[in-house]
Image (spheres, rainbow, N blue to C red):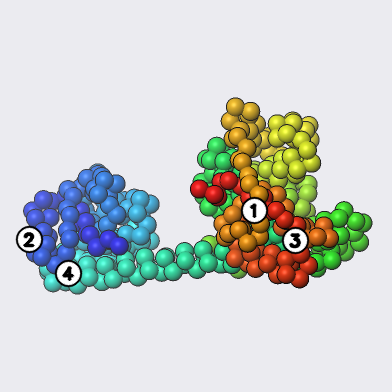
Amino acid sequence: MSTRILCVDDEPNILAGFQRNLRKQFQLDIAVGGTDGLRSIQENGPYAVVVADMQMPLMNGVEFLTRVQALAPDTVRMMLTGDAGQKTAMDAVNQGHVFRFLTKPCPPETLALALTAGLKQHHLMIAERELLENTLSGAVRMLGELLSTVEPRSFGQGQQLAAEARRLGALLKYPNPWELEIAATLGGIGFVTVPPATLTKAQLKETLTGAETDTLTRVPEIGARLLGHIPRLEAVAAIVHYQDKHYDGSGFPADARAGDDVPLGARILHVLSAMLRAEAGGLSRMIALEHMRQRPGFFDPRVLDAAFTCYAPETTAAPVACRAINLHELRIGHLLAAGVETFQGVLLVSAGNRVTPGLMEKLRNFALLEGIKEPIYVSEETEG
């Protein structure tokens, strides 16, 4: 966690005074003018606190601190000025999001107290962010564990979808890849609310009642509602909600969104899901994409074109080798290369699932109570 401070002013004498009076208490860097200040942040940052003078030529303090906020949002920003006017203060707070506003001349002890408060504020911001990130990470892991236990087929499909979304998202320069991967992995989280009997009927392709069909259709909406309760997953929830929406506005949900108004992440998952379903049915990816191209209005043409580029034969990865093991050899983290079934032929977990503690416990319980078919096939990818 940084404890360094940057002072920016257009007067070298003032900066020299800062160094003389404060260098024993703080790790202090200086920069003459806004341009040098931005360069220091880019080359030597991040800084815990940045202090800037308001009256600088070419780039005043408000303009500078606004740029600092964009470059380093976790940096605490302060302003020194000889103009204590109301408008200056309002601009500093509203545009530069200034933590502390100090008037010149500012006694060294007053500035030192302000810098100490700024460092404490920075530490608090970092601690809160880390807490939120850890909470988010834990919530995502918990939901993945739940989905892998309740509906392992969907979880396995989600893991495969996430791997492909990572590739296609990179090609499309998706701005927040982590959102896309979480949406792909947890896109089926709504299945945890569906009665097991309905899931079994759907898996066996038995005739569903109208209510059962409606329940399965609304799984993305249910999943979005569950994810929407978790801080910072609002965009992920929107992707999950619209993952079955067609580019022309048809599909689920039945609202007015269409075209580029549908979240890009949802449009990416819509293409990948259709491709992977066709591949599971025996088609190659390129043939599947050709068939999808014959359905105008269903898929975003730009995403579809990117998929053709991504999965062209020369760029397709070679198949990963697998090996057969018994249940007692199965380890957390193994990637299943084939589904695991009971002796009665009931699918417990599909290919593509990565073994989690919950899934391991489930397989052991079924092996004890009903028996499972062995060997189990795992990808050499995890054999290292």
Q: Which residue is mark 1?
A: 325
Residues marked 3 and 4 touching at CB (< 8 Å)? no
Q: In this rendering, which labeled residue sits more in front, label 1 or label 4?
A: 1
Measured Cα–Cα span from mark 3 to mark 4: 69 Å
Q: Are marks 1 and 4 in contact (CB under 8 Å)?
A: no
Q: CA distance from mark 1 to mark 2?
A: 69 Å
Q: Quadrant of the N terminus?
A: bottom left
Q: Residue at x 11, y 50 (%)?
A: 12
Image marks 1 and 3: residues in contact by CB distance under 8 Å: no
Amino acid identity at mark 1: Ile
Residue, disc 2: 20
| Front one among 60 and 310 | 310
Label 3: which secondary element: loop
Give residue 102's position: percent from left, percent from top: 22, 66
* Residue 27 visible, this angle: yes
Q: Is residue 148 above or below residue 55?
A: below
Quadrant of res 304: top right
Looking at marks 2 and 3 on the same chain, the residue that comes earlier in the sequence is marked by 2
Chain-order first, disc 4 or disc 2: 2
Q: Position of residue 86 (x, y in %)?
A: 30, 65
The mark nearer the N terminus, 3 or 4, is 4
Residue for badge 3 = 372
Residue 293 visible in this rendered orientation of the protein = no
**What residue is pinned by disc 4?**
112
Question: Within 10 Å of the Cα at label 1, are there few (<14), some (14-19), or many (20+) other Cα atoms?
Answer: few
Secondary structure state at the residue bearing disc 1: strand
Answer few, some or many: residues within 10 Å of disc 2's Cα (few below 14, many 20 plus, some between 14 and 19).
few
Q: Kindly report which numbered mark, 3 or 4, lies closer to the viewer in this rendering.
A: 3
Give the residue type that dot 3 points to.
Ile
Q: CA distance from mark 1 to mark 4?
A: 65 Å
